[in-house]
């Protein structure tokens, strides 16, 4: 990042706050399992489930700060493990989307002509796929799959914006003198792309990808909310939300906890991403 | 010039820092006041009923009754319907020759009396009630009964109920299209019908009380058959106390009272509105607001609220369903081809913990037959129960003292509830060294896979009875119910001794002898453990104080045909429930 | 120009076809709808009859061809299929027939026709709220740029973007509808006024994200426009700030917002699956969810086709508009 952009970014308080949030959530994702006080899948049937079958509330049982979930599992530990699952899915799906999107965009913009036409039409096709519906259908096909299918589904369906932006930026870069010169000098395509085109494209891609992580967190929890997410008993924020769904009238806390984490993570990535975009691409 | 200073849109400018500070303080004060107000006046949810009735005990007609169900009606065609909510709708619109009273006894309905039985228990003669009219005004006669049975038994109806009537003389050949008449069904007069069976079958009267056998008008079927298959299921005409006004699948069904109903007086609401696919917190909240008149089934917290509530106590009923839930194991697939492994599973599951996780909405059990079914044995000698030590012994007997080397896969359906329960027994089985991988699939895939040979190792399974007879449960383990791709015997359990007992019990006319045979069969199934039997669910239904004449039916469960409304209802202040101890909420 | 439009239309049709093929294949591998449609108690015979009747025993290519209406019809009931009005039925998408729903057992088109107006009520009101709240907030933020008001509004929009409906929906339902009683607790109601009353809360919840987006777009565009020369000129002429804002700023800044509305058109019709589920609003979204759960292929396909066509129309209009403004693209 060039120093001016860095300065602009540092002056943006919102973006800094976003960065702090992003770092916190990511750390939680990495270290959550070590920080968690209990096994997230262990059912404390004698302590965390009260006589009438309801889970114990926050603070009422020593050692379980946030109380239990409907099966008597430690809520705090599940939230922390959930962070890892949610963050893994979000990062992996984004990485996949960036990989496909940048590749398609670079090739399309750099080669142009027929290849460009065909690829852009392909983007149109993927764009007309109803995202949630297709994700649900694909989940059904693989019937309660592991994490990787979830990442695959989310990644494969959301690279189109990235491809379009990359293509536009590549087209722009292709007209620059130094790229034209490099091509005229007969450098191999790969070298021109990597050395001269990609750096031009990188800025906006990073910004978009950051915001995309936020959308992936939302998508994962939306699928889990509809009961189509990770495999039980794995905890993710979305699956916790879905397991607490029927209890919202009487026990809103079980809905509120994962909601706070989801909202905070999404909020952080959005702020950070916007900040990056403003810093890298100053309009004002 | 003033506009240039503000050219960046900055608003602060002119009035200086003092104003800004005052404004900041004001904002803080207002926010603080608001939060204090919010805490002091945090709204209270309604504790008891918001409305009560007029207090007039005379049954009378009028009003609109609004109720809800968590799923939807599939069809109003009695020939095809085979699920609880469709039965609920059909029982508003149709009557059978026979019915069950509130003690589960068979009673006549469209028939004048229970049929005369002759010919060693093979022949049943029904005498029809006179003056019964369909919603289209035509009188019901013996021809309608004969035609309805023919339509039901023909292969065109694709009725899932056909197997219940196979014993009628000529029925299988007629169903297969090999003959054009059914000698076993005869009209003897305008109001008399006679059925003849190939062999004595005690359960036949139960079959005649099932909605499959409800008489339907031929002209209505012929009219809608032209439009398309199943069209008649959306345009039902019956003899029941209500007519269908409109039905939008997945949204609502609206009924109105039928003035020509034969069983007069029959006071009831002028209109009934059934809201489909309405469940969970939305349904309960609406009910407690007084927007719904009755609900069945609710989320855990709401269940506990009603259970503890004194104000609601007179208006709810809790009863064990006639349903058995268990964990089925495929007896043809390793490791469950070993009876010891199956027994180990049956001993390993803590049914009490399971019941508690369901807020006590499950009666723990260790046998196939629910308590309401004759043949149930409270002291079954080889009863399955929770005993981790015995479970480990059985594992050792099977040659796996340290548990199974490979994990087993359990197929579960996609409801939140089945996921919740599965995680409970998953943990129990881990304790005895069986690692279970849960494979959550759509309900469709679940049904398809579990009925297929060599496909699903393990899966939760349930059975909801068709009629109150043990045979309706035990046939699930009859080796004749095995089929390579559409098996009713989903655990693929084979035991010649069981088959023999069931074949012997079917024609047995002496109830005591039958029950003895069934008790023996029940014992075998518990001992061989093709399923680990877990629990019978407890159902709860709640209704508003002004809903009268309603009680859940032991066979039909939600049965609203005798409801009447004590209107006008009026709103009562919640303060009247102030001494209410039940605050199940927000622990 | 006409050539360009024709070419783009051709591509749009091709893209729609691709979507149809992909989703059709997915529905095919997703499982056998007979079991869900007929229920767990269904007999073998009934399941077999169902499969034969709907042509599910045929190879997938024959089924696809039949669905599109380019091959022999595999639906047994379709041959003699007669509508209540006496007209004979079709078999195939190209003839305008979406087929008969497995679970509702009536023509898919009828079911969808009943649901579309409801979804339009909900989405229309949501869009209204989005615009009202979003544009107003955007204008205020731009006008009071770099003040606490602006920061507060922008913070609010970030929160709005970060809160999914499945978080806000249940909580709002519990608090505003159940505890405070300001709104009905979910559902659809009877009669036009009741429909609108029932739609208020779900529409507001649905509008949160959109309003936040509009506010952000409006603010940044307005700030850009206010920097333009003609605005400076107007200001130099001595027009008051409010007059400048509304006469020159807002009018110009609205254009991108209008484009955004155009692009959200498919979602207006496609419905909001999650919101409709939370509030038990019987629109297209809820229908879609039920159809997928029931493996009701004709219903799922119809919704997908409608959605794909809407997206293509939106893209087409956007492309044509760009092409008209920028002749280079026509190429």
Image (tube, coloured by chain):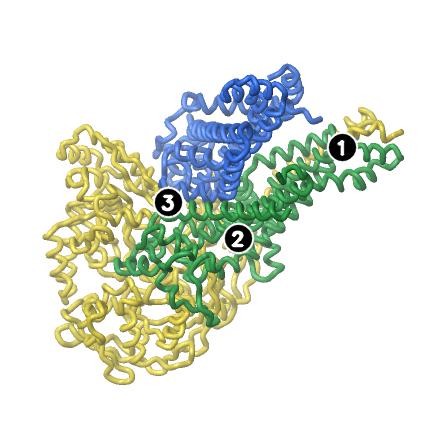
Chain colours: A blue, B yellow, C green
- Label 2 resides on the chain identified as C
Q: Residue at x 87, y 32 (%)?
A: C236
Which mark sits nearer the N-terminus, 1 or 2?
1
Task: Tell me which corner region of the image, top left, top right, bottom left or bottom right, holds residue A224.
Answer: top left
Q: Nearer the viewer, residue B347 or B471?
A: B471
Q: Residue B508, percent across and down?
A: 13, 65
| Quarter of the image where the C terminus of chain C is located | top right
Which SS class for mark 3? loop
Left or right: where B231 falls relative to B429: right
Question: Badge 1: how crowded within 10 Å, few (<14), some, or many (20+)?
Answer: some
| Residue at mark 1 to residue at mark 2: CA–CA distance | 39 Å
> Is residue A59 visible to us here?
no
State if disc 3 and disc 1 touch (CB < 8 Å).
no
State if disc 2 and disc 1 touch (CB < 8 Å).
no
Q: Nearer the viewer, residue B525 or B180?
A: B180
- Label 3 resides on the chain identified as B
* Residue B207 vertical position relative to residue A65 in the rendered view, above or below: below
Left or right: where B496 falls relative to A86: left
Q: Residue C102, percent across and down?
A: 39, 58
Q: Where is mark 2, residue-wise?
A: C281
Which SS class for mark 1? loop
Q: Where is mark 1, residue-wise?
A: C144
Picture disc at residue B414: 3
């Amino acid at each position: 990042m060039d120093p001016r952009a860095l300065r602009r970014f540092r002056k943006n308080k919102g973006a800094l706050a976003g960065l702090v949030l992003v770092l916190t959530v990511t750390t939680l994702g990495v270290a959550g399992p070590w920080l968690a006080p209990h096994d997230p899948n262990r059912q404390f049937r004698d302590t965390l489930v009260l006589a009438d079958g309801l889970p114990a509330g926050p603070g009422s049982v020593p050692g379980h700060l946030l109380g239990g979930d409907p099966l008597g599992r430690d809520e705090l530990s599940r939230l922390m493990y959930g962070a890892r699952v949610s963050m893994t899915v979000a990062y992996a799906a984004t990485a996949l989307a960036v990989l496909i999107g940048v590749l398609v965009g670079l090739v399309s913009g750099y080669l142009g002509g027929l290849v460009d036409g065909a690829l852009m039409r392909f983007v149109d096709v993927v764009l007309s796929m109803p995202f949630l519906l297709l994700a649900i259908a694909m989940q059904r096909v693989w019937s309660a799959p592991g994490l990787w299918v979830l990442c695959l589904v989310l990644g494969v369906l959301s690279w189109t914006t990235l491809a379009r932006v990359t293509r536009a930026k590549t087209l722009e870069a292709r007209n620059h003198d130094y790229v034209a010169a490099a091509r005229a000098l007969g450098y191999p395509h790969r070298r021109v792309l990597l050395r001269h085109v990609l750096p031009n494209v990188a800025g906006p891609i990073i910004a978009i990808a950051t915001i995309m992580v936020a959308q992936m967190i939302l998508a994962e929890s939306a699928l889990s909310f509809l009961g189509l997410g990770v495999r039980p008993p794995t905890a993710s924020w979305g699956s916790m939300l879905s397991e607490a769904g029927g209890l919202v009238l009487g026990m809103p806390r079980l809905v509120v906890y994962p909601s706070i984490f989801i909202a905070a993570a999404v909020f952080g990535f959005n702020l950070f991403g916007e900040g990056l975009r403003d810093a890298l691409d100053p309009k004002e | 010039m003033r506009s240039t200073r503000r050219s960046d849109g900055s608003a602060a400018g002119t009035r200086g820092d003092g104003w800004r500070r005052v404004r900041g303080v004001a904002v803080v004060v207002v926010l603080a006041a608001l939060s204090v107000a919010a805490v002091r006046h945090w709204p209270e949810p309604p504790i008891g009923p918001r409305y009560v009735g007029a207090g007039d005990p005379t049954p009378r007609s009028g009003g609109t009754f609004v109720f809800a169900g968590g799923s939807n009606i599939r069809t109003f065609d009695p020939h095809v319907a085979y699920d609880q909510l469709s039965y609920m709708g059909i029982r508003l619109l149709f009557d059978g020759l026979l019915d069950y009273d509130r003690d589960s006894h068979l009673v006549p309905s469209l028939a004048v009396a229970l049929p005369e039985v002759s010919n060693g228990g093979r022949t049943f003669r029904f005498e029809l009630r006179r003056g019964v009219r369909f919603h289209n005004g035509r009188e019901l006669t013996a021809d309608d009964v004969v035609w309805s049975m023919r339509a039901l038994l023909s292969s065109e109806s694709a009725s899932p109920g056909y197997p219940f009537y196979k014993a009628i003389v000529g029925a299988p050949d007629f169903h297969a299209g090999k003959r054009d008449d059914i000698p076993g069904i005869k009209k003897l007069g305008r109001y008399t019908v006679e059925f003849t069976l190939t062999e004595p079958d005690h359960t036949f009267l139960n079959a005649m009380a099932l909605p499959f056998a409800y008489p339907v008008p031929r002209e209505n079927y012929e009219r809608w058959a032209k439009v398309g298959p199943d069209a008649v299921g959306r345009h039902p005409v019956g003899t029941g106390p209500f007519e269908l006004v409109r039905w939008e699948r997945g949204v609502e069904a609206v009924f109105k009272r039928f003035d020509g109903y034969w069983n007069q007086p029959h006071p009831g609401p002028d209109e009934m509105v059934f809201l489909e696919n309405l469940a969970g917190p939305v349904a309960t909240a609406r009910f407690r607001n007084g927007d719904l008149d009755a609900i069945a089934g609710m989320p855990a917290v709401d269940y506990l609220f009603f259970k503890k509530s004194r104000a609601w106590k007179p208006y709810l009923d809790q009863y064990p369903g006639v349903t058995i839930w268990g964990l089925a194991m495929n007896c043809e697939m390793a490791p469950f081809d070993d009876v010891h492994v199956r027994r180990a599973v049956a001993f390993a599951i803590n049914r009490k913990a399971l019941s508690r996780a369901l807020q006590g909405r499950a009666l723990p059990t260790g046998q196939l037959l629910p308590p309401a079914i004759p043949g149930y044995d409270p002291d079954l000698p080889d009863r399955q129960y929770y005993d981790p030590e015995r479970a480990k012994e059985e594992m050792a007997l099977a040659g796996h003292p340290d548990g199974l080397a490979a994990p087993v896969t359990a197929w579960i359906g996609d409801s939140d509830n089945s996921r919740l329960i599965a995680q409970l027994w998953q943990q129990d089985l881990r304790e005895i060294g069986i690692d279970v991988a849960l494979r959550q699939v759509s309900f469709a895939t679940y049904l398809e896979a579990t009925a297929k040979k060599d496909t699903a190792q393990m899966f939760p399974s349930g059975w909801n009875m068709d009629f109150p007879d043990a045979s309706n449960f035990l046939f699930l383990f009859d080796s004749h119910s095995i089929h390579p791709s559409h098996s009713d015997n989903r655990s693929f359990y084979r035991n010649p001794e069981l088959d023999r007992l069931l074949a012997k019990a079917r024609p047995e006319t002496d109830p005591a002898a039958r029950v003895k045979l069934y008790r023996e069969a029940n014992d075998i199934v518990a001992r061989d453990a093709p399923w680990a039997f877990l629990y019978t669910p407890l159902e709860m239904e709640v209704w508003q104080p002004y809903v009268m004449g309603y009680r859940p039916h032991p066979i039909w469960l939600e049965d609203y045909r005798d409801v009447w409304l004590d209107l006008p209802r009026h709103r009562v202040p919640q303060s009247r429930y102030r001494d209410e101890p039940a605050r199940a909420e927000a622990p | 120009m006409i050539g360009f439009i024709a070419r783009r239309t051709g591509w749009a049709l091709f893209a729609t076809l691709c979507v149809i093929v992909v989703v059709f294949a997915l529905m095919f591998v997703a499982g056998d709808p007979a079991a869900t449609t007929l229920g767990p108690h269904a007999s073998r015979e009934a399941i077999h009859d169902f499969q034969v009747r709907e042509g599910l025993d045929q190879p997938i290519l024959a089924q696809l061809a039949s669905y599109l209406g380019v091959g022999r019809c595999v639906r047994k009931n379709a041959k003699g299929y007669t509508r209540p009005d006496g007209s004979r039925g079709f078999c195939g998408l190209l003839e305008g027939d979406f087929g008969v729903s497995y679970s509702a057992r009536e023509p898919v088109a009828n079911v969808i026709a009943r649901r579309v107006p409801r979804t339009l009520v909900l989405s229309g009101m949501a869009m209204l709220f989005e615009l009202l709240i979003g544009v107003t907030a955007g204008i205020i933020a731009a006008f009071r740029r770099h003040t606490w008001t602006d920061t507060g509004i922008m913070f609010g929009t970030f929160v709005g973007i970060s809160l999914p409906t499945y978080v806000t929906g249940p909580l709002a339902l519990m608090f505003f509808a159940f505890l405070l009683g300001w709104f009905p607790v979910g559902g659809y109601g009877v009669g036009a006024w009741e429909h609108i009353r029932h739609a208020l809360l779900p529409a507001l919840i649905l509008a949160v994200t959109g309003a936040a987006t509009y506010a952000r777009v409006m603010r940044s565009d307005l700030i850009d426009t206010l920097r333009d020369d003609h605005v400076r000129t107007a200001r130099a002429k001595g027009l008051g700030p409010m007059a400048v804002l509304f006469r020159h700023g807002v009018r110009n800044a609205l254009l991108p917002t209008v484009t955004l509305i155009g692009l959200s058109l498919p979602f207006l019709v496609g419905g909001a699956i999650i919101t409709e589920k939370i509030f038990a609003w019987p629109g297209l979204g809820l229908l879609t969810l039920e159809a997928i759960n029931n493996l009701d292929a004709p219903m799922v396909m119809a919704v997908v086709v409608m959605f794909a066509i809407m997206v293509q129309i939106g893209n087409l209009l956007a492309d044509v508009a760009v092409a008209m403004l920028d002749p280079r693209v026509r190429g």
